[in-house]
Image (cartoon, rainbow, N blue to C red):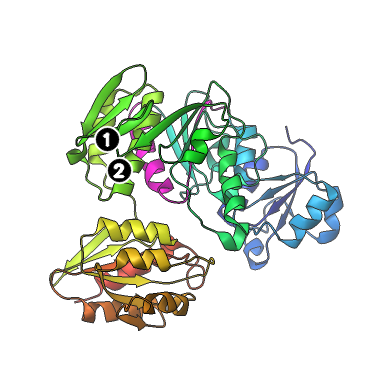
Amino acid sequence: MYENKNILILGFGVTGKSALKCLSKWNTNIYIYDEKEDLLKDYSGEIFKIFKEENLGIIDFIVKSPGINPNHKLLKLAREKGIPIKSDLELFYEISKCKNTIAITGTNGKTTTTSLLANILKEIRKTYCVGNIGKSVLDAASETGKDDYVVIEASSFQLEDTLNFKPHISIVTNITSDHLDWHGTTENYKLAKYKIFANQDENDFIIFNESNNELKSKKIRAKKYKFSTKGEVDRGAYVSKGDIYFKDSQKEKIMSVKDIKIPGDHNLENILCAISAAKLLNVDSEIIKKSVSNFMGVEHRIEYVREIKGVKYYNDSKGTNPDSTIMAIKAIDKNIVLIAGGYDKNADFDEMLKVGEGKIKHLVLFGQTAEKLQKSAKKLNYDIYLVNNLEKAVKLSYTLAQVGDTVLLSPACASWDMYPSYEVRGEDFKKLVNELV
């Protein structure tokens, strides 16, 4: 398939290393570019060449890591020369034999939905849980059989550079404005997300929120299934009078909402997405009920850490945008000490802080966006504290919180100003909380 091709792997993180391993199975000429050249020294024994700009003329295609900005100078030059640019999703689609690919995108809820659906499907067949969730899709590309399940968390960064990628089931959890520093406009961001269903046909399925009028009216070839927490839908999963139903040719009760262990209406929506996909794959309802009932959520998403002196601590480091933090605020009753701030993605925090009125007692801010958040919060007379780092934020929150309060790390921002990932930030928060006495 890739015999004698000259391939540039742009970025040598998780995706780049997986791409190298995957493509090395063919007789290819692989070039690698990463601005952190020290990353390449550890792989001096591997069969690849360090890319130099003069090599661009012989490159057949580029495998772009999700973390490489679309305006990178090499990508601009490649586009001018007509060199194809592929994401890991596109490469996976070219290599994998799997016919049961489920791809999940959205501004929020991707990780929870992906994890839950993979847990359900693992009960009946070999299942790979990959993508933006931590394990590269390329790690599974060569291994998957045609009857296996592959559940992919797909980010806008990955979808943007797809051309033929075609999942059997696509799920759009929700779409709100995000990553404007990257995509430029909300419309561009949506266009990237909506590539998830661009190649689907009448033999495929798409699942999305009943309230998404744009998708309801859009001409989509895949069969449309909707989900709703507010009442019955024509086709899909919904909540009615405290029970979850799935409706297709007939209506079936799946389980009671009371059996769900993870908090928040947003998680209920994620569960409806997973149930819909499982039912479309003909999974027995008892298996679905058991898996959903046992699901405790994902790490770094409203994750309970511990209780100290009557104060509960929650890690929501995956709250990397205001809408995600709104969901976390809504999931907790009241008396919140909110720790927020981080890398600036050009987000607006006004709505988030309005939602927090009456629930947030103290606002502890750190990171690149601390002053921007402070400016928004001052309009609403919040009790605001600015600190230099997360350690100081945790220690200050410990002194501010009283019995019955909740200390919530939900930054509403990416981690990249201080941490390489939200996972590292979340781990640091848990370590700091567990050191409190």
Please say if 190 is above or below 40. Answer: above
Whether pointer 2 and pointer 1 mark residues with C-beta atoms closer than 8 Å, the reply is yes
The quarter in which the C terminus is drawn is: bottom left
Q: Looking at the image, which is closer to me, 388 or 204?
A: 204
Label 1, residues with CA under 10 Å away: few <14, some 14-19, many ≥20: many
Dot in front, 2 or 1? 1
Is residue 121 one of those drawn in magenta?
yes
Residue depicted at x 63% and y 59%: 184
Badge 2 or badge 1: first in the primary sequence: 1
Residue depicted at x 27% and y 25%: 285
User: Can you tell which mark lies on residue 239?
Assistant: 1
Could you tell me which secondary element the residue under label 2 belongs to? Answer: helix
Side (left or right) of 97 relative to 348 = right
The quarter in which the N terminus is drawn is: top right
Residue depicted at x 57% and y 54%: 186
Label 2, residues with CA under 10 Å away: few <14, some 14-19, many ≥20: many
* Magenta range: 97-124
Reading the image, the residue beneath label 2 is: 268
Q: Distance between the residues labelled 2 and 1?
A: 9 Å
